Image: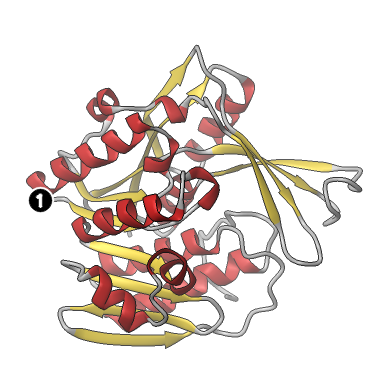
Amino acid sequence: MAMTGTTVCLGETMAQVTPADGEGLERSRELRLAVAGAESTVAQYLADLGHRAAWVSRVGDDPLGRRIVAAVAGRGVDVGGVRVDPDAPTGVYFKDPGPEGTRVHYYRRGSAASRMGPADAERVDLAGARLLHLTGITPALSDGCAELVDLLMERASRAGVLVSFDVNHRPALWGSVGQAATALRELGRRADIVFVGRDEGERLWGTATAEDIHAHLAPRGTLVVKDGAVGATEFTCGEREFVPAPAVDVIEAVGAGDAFAAGHLSGLLRGSAPRERLALGHRLAGRTLRSIEDYVPADTLEGN
């Protein structure tokens, strides 16, 4: 059943190139082209689960940009807020599987999405929105993107729209860990729902536990700390809830955090209890962990 109120997700989506045979880029003889972006992935999962979702971004006036918009729209996501930039390309990234895990190589400098700025806020319709979902990737793309995120958080707060923020620290996008730590902490403190990995917290703020992250951020609303195969902890209104992660045969971890966020947000939008929304987050993340794709359609969760 469709939910009332739209979730607006803003951020860059890129063309993703992955070795089809699981070999590294140096040895693989066949590559697969897919679509991947933290915020559009969340939007697609929410649409799969019966929610109204919109994705706002920029893409280049090129085949990759058209492919991305068509793919996201094909999952039932409103893409009316996506602008085609004739003067900049769509970003691309490559996955490089190896014995030590998957490395990711980004080619996004000067991309269409990195050129977003405050003027793009006009395309973000919060009038019918219930939730605005942002990540720490967007403010790291450019000064204009950082200004856009700041403006949208302010507008959402004034409009009574909940703000969801996934820290999603990408070290290669930031000038230094210190710069990222300060910016992501302040954005997290302004959000109503915050997602952060325990390892991210330790890298950014030197926090060793979920409790340490909660004490450091002092969030105004809900904080969810993800700890990989261990489980996830939610802090809300002085209450703490922990749900262990189910055992999964992991093929690749890229994208699992976005799937988890989407599952949790779906539960939140439906009014589920913390334990239920954490469990749904784990179930969606499990789908991604068992695949080389960042997004695995979740029209049904049967068998997961």
Foreground: 225 or 33?
225
* Residue 258 sits above or below residue 25 on the image: below
Foreground: 118 or 213?
213
The residue sitting at 50% across, 52% down in the picture is 170
Q: Quadrant of residue 142?
A: top left
Sort mark 1 into few (<14), some (14-19) or many (20+) by Cα contacts within 10 Å: few
Which residue is denoted by mark 1 in the rendering?
160
The residue sitting at 26% across, 53% down in the picture is 187
Foreground: 1 or 59?
59
Which element carries disc 1, helix, strand or loop? loop
The residue sitting at 20% across, 45% down in the picture is 153
Q: Quadrant of the C terminus?
A: bottom right
Q: How many marks?
A: 1
Q: Quadrant of the N terminus?
A: bottom left
* Residue 139 sits above or below residue 161 on the image: above
Q: Is residue 11 left or right of residue 88?
A: left
The residue sitting at 45% across, 30% down in the picture is 114
Percent coordinates x, y for residue 22 in the rendering: 82, 57
- State how the image is colored: secondary structure
Q: Is residue 207 left or right of residue 231?
A: left
Q: Is residue 218 left or right of residue 93?
A: left
Q: Quadrant of residue 198?
A: bottom left
* Residue 114 sits above or below residue 24 on the image: above
Percent coordinates x, y for residue 235 in the rendering: 26, 79
The amino acid marked with disc number 1 is Gly
Q: Quadrant of residue 125?
A: top left
